[in-house]
Image: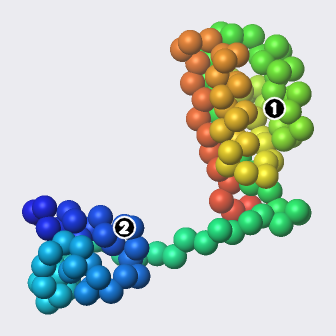
Amino acid sequence: MDHFDEKIIAALKENARQSVSAIAEQVNLSRSAVSERIKRLEEQGEILGYQVLTAQKLSSNQQLKAYFQISHGGFKCRPLVAFLMQYPEVKLCHGISGEVDLLVYLEVDSMQRIHDILAELDDRLPEKARVTTHMVLREWRQ
């Protein structure tokens, strides 16, 4: 991949719907050269596909669901659970066996809210603690 290919990919990342002619103008190549390069980049797997991103809003009855898996290595759970339960988004805290000490279930309105809670949680945890976030993608119920 040369600098022309990189410029073409940058142009497509900026706007994948722009015409080949518009990209050719931006990268100073002919339309046919850009078209051939795009085809080659697709065949080589450099360009994997194109997608549409929407500004999907959650309706008032929809929520993002997530779990925090917390491994804190001997830190006491009780004060941590008390801290976590102050957030209305935290629905359950499970103290569990194994390498993970605490499993926390949340329902939030946005990814930003998860980020905010994690940032505040990070200030409370010991230095070697580890938090892994798991987003619920699908749910089955009996």
Q: Bin the neighbour count of mark 2 within 10 Å (Cα to Cα): few under 14, some 14-19, many 20 and up.
A: few
Give neighbour class at mark 1: few <14, some 14-19, many 20+ (Cα, 10 Å).
some
Say which of marks 1 and 2 sits in front. 2
Front residue of this view, candidates 64 and 134: 64
Residue 63 in sight here: yes
Residue 72 position within the rendered picture, expressed as x and y whole percent measured from the top left:
63, 17
Left or right: where 92 falls relative to 53: right
Task: Tell me residue 39's x, y (percent).
Answer: 20, 83
Q: Is residue 38 shown above or below 78?
A: below
Q: Look at 54% across and 14% down and name the residue there.
A: 128
Residue marked by disc 2: 13
The residue under label 1 is 93
The three-letter code of the residue at mark 1 reads: Cys
Q: Residue furthest bottom?
A: 32
- Front in this rendered view, residue 93 or 89: 89
Asked which quadrant contains residue 31, the reply is bottom left
Residue visible at 62% across and 12% down?
Answer: 126
Q: Is residue 42 left or right of residue 1?
A: right
- Give the residue at x 80% y 56%: 63
Observer-nearest residue: 86 or 9? 9
The image's mark for residue 22 is none
- Report the front residue among 16 and 90: 16
SS type, badge 1: strand
Q: Which image quarter is the C terminus in? A: bottom right
> Which percent across, then down, holds residue 80?
78, 18
Vertical arrangement, residue 128 with respect to residue 1, above or below: above
